[in-house]
Image (tube, rainbow, N blue to C red):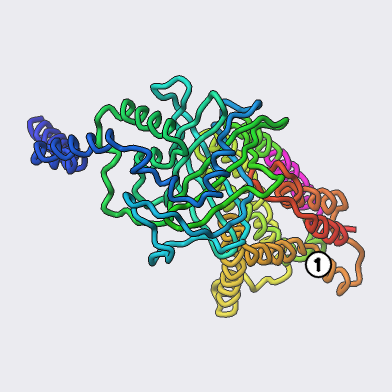
């Protein structure tokens, strides 16, 4: 008994020591150098409170036309939206410029330092933004945090942002930096377009932080890069929120403006959850229907003669297609988290069920058509199994890379690769057609299975490439109907 108590005491002591070490680097530093740190915080805080628009604003570095555009965008309008938390997507046009000179701040170098990246001049790209809001000490202003993803051909960056939103006029001023960069609220204050907004922002952050400097400690692994001021005006729209946005970098001398006549479309977090839930429920229903159709097809081909008329290449292509879908949805659910895990994993389980049924059917058909292919006791069988694995991963890995590149960059090259991948994967009926021609037989698969499977499998590409309100914010393309016609023509 004493040995057990001693062992438990040692374990608790080691656990306490681990907690002390894991939580204690910053604590130890503060305890050993608290006078120096307090003196530094005091000097820094006094400097923060003495900041002025005339001497510390980065907005004044911008060219006159950019300043005028930002001021015009931030003017109070007759219609504006107060609740801006949600997801936004839109497009931008990039324009390079030469900054002004400010004797206090200094003029930014027009040549980008090594490691800095900006969009090409006159290029166009996409914007995806997530915003969250929380109250500040001023009832008319909210504290904003979130992230933004900017991408175009040859340019792709993810930024974290923070800023302020004014409820009285529907405007917001945000500051965004690369994910591994050090972000401070000082940059938000310096981004303000007027002296009044500058002083108001400084006062809000002064009181909100309450004298704490922890938010301003620069991490050792921080990287420098192009930082952006984002000026936005939020208005109402029939389907949610829409905004005009002006994104400008004073240290990389580039302006990203919403194209004329367009806007940044937004949807609240609650409505986006509803859309995502409907998508997962629809996917679950379709996968269960597909599993039922496949089960009926398997029951209709129980004899060796019937299985010999089914193309195992068609089944293999469908199994790979479901593997792509399974991986894509798994990554999406883990990335979103929260409520998406509940509905997402149920849908993923349905995809996994369909994939398992296809693999089981494939093995049964393959064993009938090639009895020696799965015999691991002889050299020919082992070579056959190795060939199957090599072919599977040779097809799977490039496809997964193509899907990831398309989702992350949406570049022209990734769009062409995605088009090639979809065309190849939705040619799954061709091996069966070729087998029917070679054997000189009519259709050997159930008609309800062929038609139903074609409709179920077309749901994903039609949803993401034809529906303008899809959950991935992919722009519709009329070329998707070519793929639909191509796939249905095989089933005819």
How would you classify the magenta stretch by its main secondary structure?
helix
Residue positioned 49% across, 31% down in the render: 165
Front residue of 127/55: it is 55
Position above or below: 456 against 265: below
Which quarter of the image is occupied by the C terminus? bottom right
Q: Which residues are magenta?
A: 283-301
Position above or below: 352 against 417: above
Front residue of 225/168: it is 168
* Magenta span contains residue 285: yes
Residue positioned 57% across, 58% down in the render: 95
Q: Secondary structure at mark 1?
A: helix
Q: Furthest residue to the top?
A: 139
Q: Position of residue 269 (x, y in %)?
A: 57, 32
Which image quarter: residue 342? Answer: top right
Which image quarter: residue 432? Answer: bottom right
Residue positioned 55% across, 35% down in the render: 74
Residue 331 in view, yes or no: no
Q: Position of residue 156 (x, y in %)?
A: 52, 58
Residue 490 is left or right of residue 386, and the answer is: right
Q: Position of residue 208 (x, y in %)?
A: 33, 27
Q: What residue did someone put label 1 on?
A: 430
């Amino acid at each position: 008994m004493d040995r057990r108590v001693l062992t438990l005491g040692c374990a608790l002591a080691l656990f306490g020591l681990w907690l002390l070490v894991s939580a204690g680097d910053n604590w130890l530093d503060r305890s050993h150098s608290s006078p120096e740190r307090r003196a530094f915080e005091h000097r820094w805080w006094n400097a923060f409170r003495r900041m002025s628009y005339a001497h510390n604003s980065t907005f004044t570095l911008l060219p006159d036309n950019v300043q005028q555009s930002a001021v015009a965008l931030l003017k109070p309008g007759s219609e504006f939206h107060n609740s801006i938390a949600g997801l936004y997507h839109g497009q931008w046009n990039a324009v390079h410029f030469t900054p002004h000179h400010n004797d206090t701040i200094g003029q930014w170098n027009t040549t980008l330092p090594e490691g800095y990246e900006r969009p090409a001049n006159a290029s166009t790209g996409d914007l995806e933004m997530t915003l969250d809001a929380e109250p500040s000490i001023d009832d008319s202003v909210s504290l904003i945090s979130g992230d933004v993803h900017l991408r175009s051909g040859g340019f792709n960056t993810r930024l974290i942002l923070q800023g302020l939103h004014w409820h009285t006029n529907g405007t917001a001023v945000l500051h965004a930096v690369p994910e591994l960069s050090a972000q401070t609220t000082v940059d938000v204050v310096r981004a303000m377009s007027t002296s009044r907004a500058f002083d108001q922002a400084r006062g809000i952050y002064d009181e909100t932080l309450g004298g704490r400097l922890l938010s301003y400690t620069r991490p050792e692994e921080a990287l420098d890069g192009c930082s952006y001021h984002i000026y936005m005006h939020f208005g109402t729209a029939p389907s949610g929120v829409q905004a005009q946005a002006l994104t400008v970098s004073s240290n990389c001398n580039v302006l990203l403006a919403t194209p004329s006549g367009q806007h940044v479309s937004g949807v609240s977090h609650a409505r986006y959850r509803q859309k995502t839930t409907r998508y997962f429920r629809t996917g679950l229903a379709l996968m269960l229907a597909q599993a039922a159709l496949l089960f009926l097809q398997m029951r209709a081909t129980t004899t060796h003669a019937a299985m010999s008329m089914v193309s195992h290449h068609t089944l293999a292509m469908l199994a790979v297609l479901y593997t792509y879908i399974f991986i894509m949805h798994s990554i999406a659910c883990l990335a979103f988290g929260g409520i998406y895990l509940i509905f997402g994993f149920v849908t993923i389980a349905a995809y996994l069920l369909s994939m398992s049924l296809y693999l089981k059917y494939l093995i049964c058909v393959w064993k009938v058509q090639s009895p020696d292919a799965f015999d691991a006791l002889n050299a020919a069988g082992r070579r056959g199994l190795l060939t199957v694995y090599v072919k599977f991963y040779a097809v799977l890995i490039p496809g997964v890379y193509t899907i990831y590149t398309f989702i992350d960059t949406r570049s022209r090259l990734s769009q062409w690769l995605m088009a090639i991948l979809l065309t190849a994967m939705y040619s799954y009926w061709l091996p069966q057609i070729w087998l029917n021609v070679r054997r000189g037989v009519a259709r050997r698969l159930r008609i309800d299975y062929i038609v139903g499977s074609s409709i179920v499998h077309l749901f994903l590409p039609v949803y993401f490439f034809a529906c303008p309100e899809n959950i991935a914010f992919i722009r519709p393309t009329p070329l998707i109907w070519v793929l639909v016609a191509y796939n249905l023509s095989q089933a005819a």
